[in-house]
Image (cartoon, helix red, strand yellow):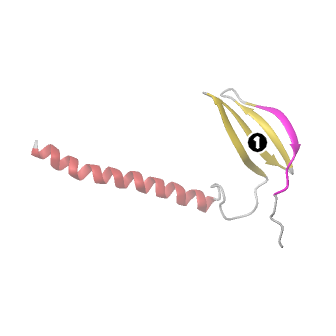
Amino acid sequence: MLEYLLRLALLLPLLAGLIWGSLWLTRWLQTRLGTAPGAAGGTRRLQLVETSFLAPGIKLAVVRFRDREILLGCTRQGLVRLGEAPAEAAILPESI
């Protein structure tokens, strides 16, 4: 029983450290490769604006592409374009 508790006391912190390290490495690689949202680098042509979960395996997504906002239906089988509209300009507060 004592041997089991010693192994548990050694392996649980090791496992927690490995989990934390893999999460840190993933975040670091995403920012380095420029795949994370808000990552440094050039502007991206395709931007995910909003998603909405409808049911298991079904989502609605709004993406901005070339000054257009496109509504997509996303299922396990694929994507369907449901609608399109001009992109709304960012509303900036007026200076006094």
Q: Position of residue 5 (x, y in %)?
A: 16, 46
Give the SS element for disc 1: strand
Q: Position of residue 39 (x, y in %)?
A: 65, 61
Q: Is residue 85 magenta?
A: yes
Q: Position of residue 50 (x, y in %)?
A: 71, 44
The residue at the point 82 percent across, 41 percent down is 70
Q: Is residue 27 above or below residue 84?
A: below
Residue 78 image point, x, y percent = 71, 29
Up-down relation of residue 96 to residue 84 (above or below): below
Identify which residue is drawn at 35% across, 52% down: 16
Quadrant of the image for the N terminus?
Answer: top left
Q: Residue furthest bottom?
A: 96
Can residue 34 be found in the magenta stretch? no
**Residue named by callout 1:** 62
Amino acid on which disc 1 is placed: Val
Outermost residue to the right: 86
Can you name the residue that lies furthest to the front here?
96
* Quadrant including the C terminus: bottom right
Q: Which secondary structure class fits the magenta region best?
A: strand
- Other residues around mark 1 within 10 Å, as few (<14) / some (14–19) / many (≥20): many
Please provide the residue range marked out in magenta.
80-90
